[in-house]
């Protein structure tokens, strides 16, 4: 039996020398004479582990690393050196590698980056770091780690067990120092002497909080603004500094004194955080030369935690000096409104404009009209005094208002111009006589009675309301009394035309003329005479015009009597041609009835919505082809026409069913009409049944087979030979067909 001088489980340290003895194998059969051979197999045999085949001593050839492999399984056996026979059964043993502190702690995720708000309280957690040790944590203190801070004091500290980094100093100010580098060490063996260590770096940045108020670099600023600066345009800038970042540095500017706020406004540029000062009203050096602005800058986002630091705003004073600029003349009014009477002679004064140099030197001013406007034709201006005159009489009815533009410039500096609109109103004078308003003819009915009002008239006046609101009417006094009409003034600026005699006749006299004088109520009063045309027209009752409309239309179209006659003749000729054409077409038609003895097929024409299958019997033409057969198809018979046999042309004798020379078909149709009216079985709506009777009397009879009750074998076609050569071929054809059927 192979036995070891040590236990089967052998522990071997990493620091063991390369030829370190591990154990010895010994067999009971070994007498010490060298006849026993020891062999070793298994993991690492021959490479890591070697055996002395004579003595059985096992040695390690290289150092072992527990972190790579914790144990090895080997097999040993004793053999007879001469016969190579096994002296003992194979023996298995395990070599376990005992751990030693040969691995230093490591930070696998380092270096680290961390953020912490400035002004944080002491003990605020920043970051937790964790180191790993490859040694066996269950054996000794090889993997027991302790953390310590090598760099970063006194600002930060680290928990020795957990590795949590915390702030160690109060009120750390980002504006004073923003970035910190902290070095953390991890040491095994619980920090004892001889333990291994590793370190990592943490870059800590302080984030910004609003702990700094805005601050103007100086308390007093000065700004020069010329008086010609445009309203709404920026005239200057001012800026307060804020050491914070982002929204914590946003500033809102405002003008807190009324003197500055009335003339100027301030806004914030988002990009530069500057206060942009703009002009609200025009500046005037001659009125005010300086302005004082008290400007305040305040943070828009305030953190209440730092309210103890004071108000987060600052103020500064801005002195604005207004610069004198040579300005254009200024008119005393804007705009000017003047008036002048119409028909005033040329050179009448309308009014005057006044402009003055606003500068302190008060230069003289020159006036002139805008040459591009139409008003220059009617007015002129004195270039020194600004007085406006007319150049021609004005007509209110033609143009009641005139708009002109007056320009002024300094004599010393003609390039500086100012403009002002001038509106001239043309005042009315009573220079237009009134006129009768209506321009249409007055209609007089033939049946008018004395005292009847023919029409009420009004007047128009081109003058304005003041001179044209009141009118007076009368007939001319210098003319004899009008026997037909008179005029009544209604005293409301209207007048009524009244008939003076009974009945008028348009055939005797169609048109009457009535002159009327009308006065206005102006000063002085003007009058005008207008002549109205009165047309006599036949009227219906209640005064409705019967004929004058058509006559008026023809008259308005400008048609003379000769033209009307020509139009009527053309219409008559066209009607005659149409009648002649219709007559010729009717004469060309064939007569419907050829002979009393010729009964032919009829075409039944009807225009009916139909009554379904029940209505088809109403249009069956069998009744006209064979009345006897038709009678048998009906459910009831009121009258049946009598039929007797009649023989026709030679060599033929027709069937009684088709012999209708003594049958009155007209009576038969009437009978059918009565029967249809009394029949209760037909649909309940009207039906149009048309029967056309071809007539009788054909000397040759009918060749239609519709009325023939018999078959082809019963017909005799020899009589066709007697009709002439035209029917000879037809007789031969029917004869051949008859012979074939007989055979």
Image: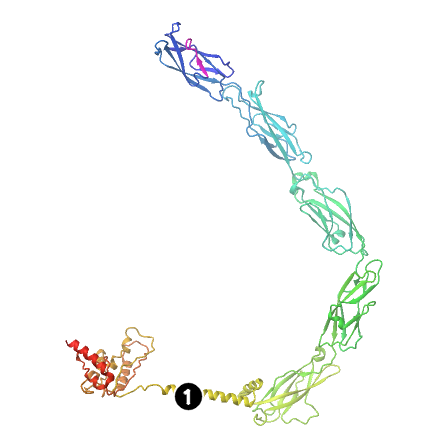
- Where does residue 29 sit, x and y in percent of width and height? 36, 7
Q: Mark 1: few, some, or many residues within 10 Å (few <14, many ≥20)?
A: few
Q: Is residue 54 magenta?
A: yes
- Where does residue 60 sit, x and y in percent of width and height? 47, 14
Query: Would you say 443 lies left or right of 212 here?
Result: left
Query: Would you say 87 lies left or right of 699 here?
Result: right
Magenta segment: 48-56
Q: Can you name the residue that lies furthest to the left here? A: 743
> Which sits in the foreground, 481 or 383?
383
Q: Is residue 727 magenta?
A: no
- Where does residue 622 sit, x and y in percent of width and height? 25, 79
> Which sits in the foreground, 441 or 52?
52
Q: Residue at x 78, y 55 (%)?
A: 227
Instruction: State the quadrant of the N terminus.
Output: top left
> Which sits in the foreground, 314 or 529?
529
Q: Is residue 604 above or below residue 165?
A: below
> Which sits in the foreground, 170 or 458?
458
Q: Can you name the residue that lies furthest to the right here? A: 361
- Where does residue 181 sit, x and y in percent of width and height? 63, 30
Colouring convention used in this rendered image of the protein? rainbow
Q: Looking at the magenta stretch, what is its main secondary structure?
A: loop
Q: Which residue is mark 1?
A: 580
Identify the element where label 1 is drawn. Answer: helix
Q: Which quadrant holds residue 560?
A: bottom right
**Is residue 539 at all visible to an observer of this figure?**
no
**Is residue 724 at all visible to an observer of this figure?**
yes
Query: Would you say 73 lies left or right of 692 here?
Result: right
Q: Which quadrant holds residue 619?
A: bottom left
């Amino acid at each position: 039996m192979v036995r070891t001088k040590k236990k089967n489980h052998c522990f071997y340290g990493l620091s063991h020398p390369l030829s370190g003895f591990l154990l010895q194998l010994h067999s009971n059969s070994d007498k010490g004479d060298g006849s026993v051979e020891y062999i070793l197999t298994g993991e690492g045999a021959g490479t890591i582990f070697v055996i002395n085949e004579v003595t059985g001593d096992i040695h390690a050839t290289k150092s072992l690393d527990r972190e790579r492999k914790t144990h090895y399984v080997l097999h040993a056996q004793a053999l007879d050196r001469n016969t190579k026979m096994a002296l003992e059964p194979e023996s298995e043993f395990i070599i376990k590698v005992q751990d030693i502190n040969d691995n230093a702690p490591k930070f696998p995720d380092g270096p680290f980056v961390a953020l912490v708000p400035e002004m944080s309280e002491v003990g605020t957690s920043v970051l937790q770091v964790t180191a790993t040790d490859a040694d066996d944590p269950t054996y000794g203190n090889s993997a027991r780690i302790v953390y310590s801070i090598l760099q970063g004091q006194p600002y930060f500290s680290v928990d020795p067990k957990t590795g949590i980094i915390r702030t160690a100093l109060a009120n750390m100010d980002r504006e004073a120092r923003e970035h910190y580098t902290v070095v953390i060490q991890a040491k095994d063996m619980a920090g004892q002497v001889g333990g291994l260590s590793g370190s990592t770096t943490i870059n800590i940045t302080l984030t910004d909080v609003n702990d700094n108020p805005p601050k103007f670099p100086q308390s007093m600023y000065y700004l020069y603004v010329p008086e010609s600066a445009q309203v709404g345009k920026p005239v200057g800038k001012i800026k307060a500094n804020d050491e914070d970042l982002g929204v914590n540095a946003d500033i809102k500017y405002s003008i807190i004194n009324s003197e500055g706020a009335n003339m100027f406004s301030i806004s914030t540029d988002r990009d530069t955080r500057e206060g942009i000062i703009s002009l609200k009203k025009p500046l005037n050096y001659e009125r005010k030369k300086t302005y004082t602005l008290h400007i305040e800058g305040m943070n828009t986002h305030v953190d209440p935690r730092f309210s103890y630091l004071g108000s987060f705003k600052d103020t500064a004073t801005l002195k604005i000096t207004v610069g004198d600029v040579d300005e254009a003349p200024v008119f005393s009014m804007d705009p000017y409104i003047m008036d002048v009477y119409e028909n005033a002679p040329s050179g009448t004064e309308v009014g005057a404009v006044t402009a003055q140099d606003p500068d302190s030197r008060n230069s003289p001013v020159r006036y002139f009209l805008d040459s591009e406007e139409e008003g220059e034709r009617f007015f002129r201006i004195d270039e020194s005094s600004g007085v406006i005159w007319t150049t021609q009489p004005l007509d209110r009815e033609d143009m009641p208002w005139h708009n002109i533009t007056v320009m002024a410039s300094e004599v010393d500096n003609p390039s500086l111009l100012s403009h002002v609109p001038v509106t001239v109103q043309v005042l009315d004078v009573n220079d237009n006589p009134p006129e009768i308003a209506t321009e249409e003819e007055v209609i007089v009915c033939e049946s008018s009675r004395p005292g009847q009002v023919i029409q009420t008239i009004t007047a128009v006046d081109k003058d304005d309301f003041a001179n044209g609101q009141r009118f007076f009417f009368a007939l001319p006094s210098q003319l004899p009394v009008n026997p037909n009409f008179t005029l009544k003034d209604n005293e409301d600026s209207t007048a009524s035309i009244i008939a003076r005699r009974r009945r008028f006749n348009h055939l005797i006299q169609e048109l009457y003329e009535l002159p009327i004088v009308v006065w206005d109520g102006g000063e002085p009063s003007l009058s005008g005479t207008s002549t109205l045309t009165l047309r006599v027209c036949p009227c219906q009752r209640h005064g409705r015009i019967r004929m004058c409309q058509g006559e008026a239309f023809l008259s308005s179209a400008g048609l003379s009597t000769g033209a009307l006659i020509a139009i009527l003749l053309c219409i008559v000729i066209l009607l005659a041609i149409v009648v002649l054409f219709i007559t010729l077409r009717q004469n060309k038609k064939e007569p419907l009835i050829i002979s009393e003895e010729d009964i032919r097929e009829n075409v039944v024409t009807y225009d009916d919505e139909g009554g379904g299958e029940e209505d088809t019997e109403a249009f069956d033409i069998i009744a006209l082809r064979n009345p006897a057969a038709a009678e048998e198809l009906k459910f009831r018979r009121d009258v049946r026409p009598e039929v007797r046999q009649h023989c026709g042309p030679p060599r033929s004798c027709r069937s009684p069913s088709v012999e209708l020379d003594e049958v009155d078909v007209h009576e038969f149709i009437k009978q059918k009409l009565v029967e249809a009216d009394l029949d209760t079985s037909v649909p309940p709506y009207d039906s149009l049944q048309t029967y056309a009777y071809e007539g009788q009397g054909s000397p040759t009879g009918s060749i239609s087979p519709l009325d023939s009750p018999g078959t082809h074998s019963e017909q005799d076609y020899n009589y066709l030979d007697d009709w002439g050569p035209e029917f000879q071929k037809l007789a031969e054809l029917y004869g051949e067909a008859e012979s074939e059927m007989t055979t």
